[in-house]
Amino acid sequence: MASIIGLTINGRKQEHLIPDAMLLVDFLRDKLGLTGTKKGCDGGECGACTVLVDGKQRLGCMTLAKSVAGKTVETIESVGPHGRLSRLQTAFHEKLGTQCGFCTPGMIMAAESLLRDNPDPDEDEIRTALSGNLCRCTGYVKIIESVQAAIAAGEVGK
């Protein structure tokens, strides 16, 4: 079975025929070519597939694509304005918050969600917001510093 759903993806209204059992991460990657959203654990444990649905964090590997009908989905591809790096992305680059880079899109989307709700979180709030995202390369110090640097620079969160 399949359903036709309407939704907004990265600011563009769209309609798609989606198999009822298709996961959001597979829809984004395989149907739309938005490969910034990563498939990691396929079990909701690593956060690599984090996207924003109506501005809130959602794991693409735990979300049926048809369940986002009528909603707004944002992926890492939408974060930078006009094809440029956002301040959060720039901070991750400058503060070495990325190592291999696999977890980075999910980390940035989780941080983006936090900063939209709370533009000046303390370190504990940052750690809590990112706690569902695993990084196998670092001890998270550079990731936390990256979010803090973006906050210090201002203009984070939409």
Image (tube, rainbow, N blue to C red):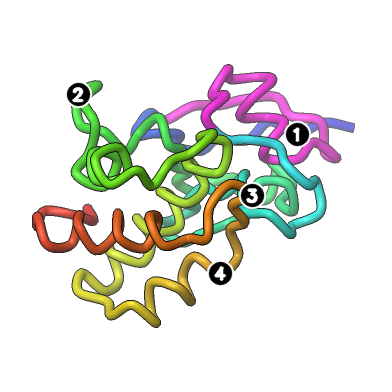
Residue found 59% across the figure and 52% down from its top: 135
Which kind of residue does numbered mark 1 sit on?
Ser
- Residue indicated by mark 4: 131
Nearest to N terminus: mark 1 or mark 4: 1
Q: Quadrant of residue 115?
A: bottom left
* The magenta segment: 13-36
Mark 2 closeness class: few <14, some 14–19, many ≥20 residues within 10 Å? few
Q: CA distance from mark 4 to mark 3?
A: 13 Å
Q: Residue 22 at what x, y percent from top left?
A: 80, 36
- Residue 129 in the image: above or below residue 48: below
**Pair 4/3: label in front:** 3
Q: Is residue 113 left or right of residue 155?
A: right
Camera-nearest label, 4 or 2: 4
Q: Residue at x 69, y 20 (%)?
A: 30
Locate residue 113, reporting x and y percent.
38, 60
Q: CA distance from mark 4 to mark 2?
A: 30 Å
Q: Nearer the viewer, mark 1 or mark 4?
A: 4
* Mark number, residue 136: 3
Q: Earlier in the sequence, mark 1 or mark 2?
A: 1
How far apart marks 1 and 2 lie (CA) works out to: 32 Å
The residue wearing badge 2 is 82
